[in-house]
Amino acid sequence: MSSGTVNCAAVLFDLDGTLADTAPDMIAALNRLCAEMGTREISFAHARPHVSHGSRALVKLGFPDADSDQVDLLIDRFLEAYARQLSEGTRLFAGMEEVLQSIEQSGRHWGIVTNKPARFTVPLIEALGLNKRAACVVSGDTVARSKPHAMPLLYACEVLALPPTHCLYVGDAERDIIAGRAAGMRTVAALYGYILTDDDPASWQADGMIEHPREILDWLEHKTRTDEHDAKLAR
């Protein structure tokens, strides 16, 4: 736990289920594949919690009886379908634009650290108009390891020229919190994201949990004040 943090100079976000609501396009791609293969479509409500776990989780959800070789082939077809329409229904979560603007106005940086491959991440953030605003973008294949390994987050720190203790990482999956903690960052679990019914975010040991993106600003203000107070007492 990075309890020695005195200043938060950057906020890093997971992409799917934290910064942007990508579920509409991910699930649409899955259901196009289901239609092509002659299987029943998956309801949005049933599929949504699985989106943060990527293409393999969604394909297995749609094709539970497929063996590993079939799953690999279906993943390729799913990704082709997704690439064709990856920004049709994807939007920032409600309140997130306000959060980004507030972070920018405060002089802090913000960036993206996702397990989503760059061939999808880059065009998506361009479509969302974020490519010139994000101080760093680390995709799932930017470095040799992906989350829950700390490497992507530590690489983001290198790009930002900041120590991990001055960064906050926000994510909606346990792997995000594990990676953030391993990197030495403060972490916040985004409960508004894609949380499975058997997930237990309280057990992830995040520094905070939020129900809405705007709570990031409240959390930043509160924690910064608390850390500054603790630092003064320690002098």
Image (cartoon, grey):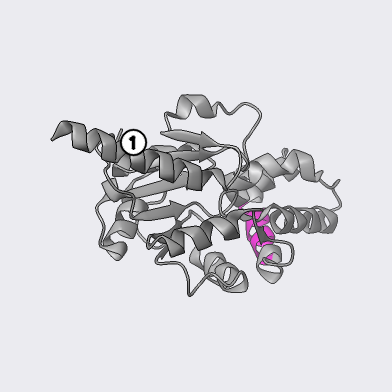
SS assignment at label 1: helix
**Residue at mark 1:** 226
- Vertical placement of 146 versus 209: above or below? below
Residue kind at label 1, given as amino acid type: Thr
Residue drawn at x 57%, y 47% as measured from the top left: 214
Choose between 101 and 201: the one closer to the eye. Answer: 101
Q: Is residue 65 left or right of residue 111?
A: right
Q: Position of residue 34 (x, y in %)?
A: 80, 52
Residue drawn at x 58%, y 52% as measured from the top left: 16
Dividing the picture into quarters, in which one does residue 234 lie?
Answer: top left
Residue 66, visible in the rendered structure: no
Q: Position of residue 181 (x, y in %)?
A: 34, 38
Based on the picture, tell me whether residue 76 belongs to the magenta stretch: yes
Dividing the picture into quarters, in which one does residue 194 lie?
Answer: top right
Residue 68, visible in the rendered structure: yes
- Identify the main secondary structure in magenta: helix
Choose between 52 and 93: the one closer to the eye. Answer: 93
Q: Is residue 70 left or right of residue 156?
A: right
- Vertical placement of 226 versus 73: above or below? above
Stretch in magenta: 72-80
Q: Is residue 178 left or right of residue 199?
A: left
Residue drawn at x 59%, y 68% as measured from the top left: 124
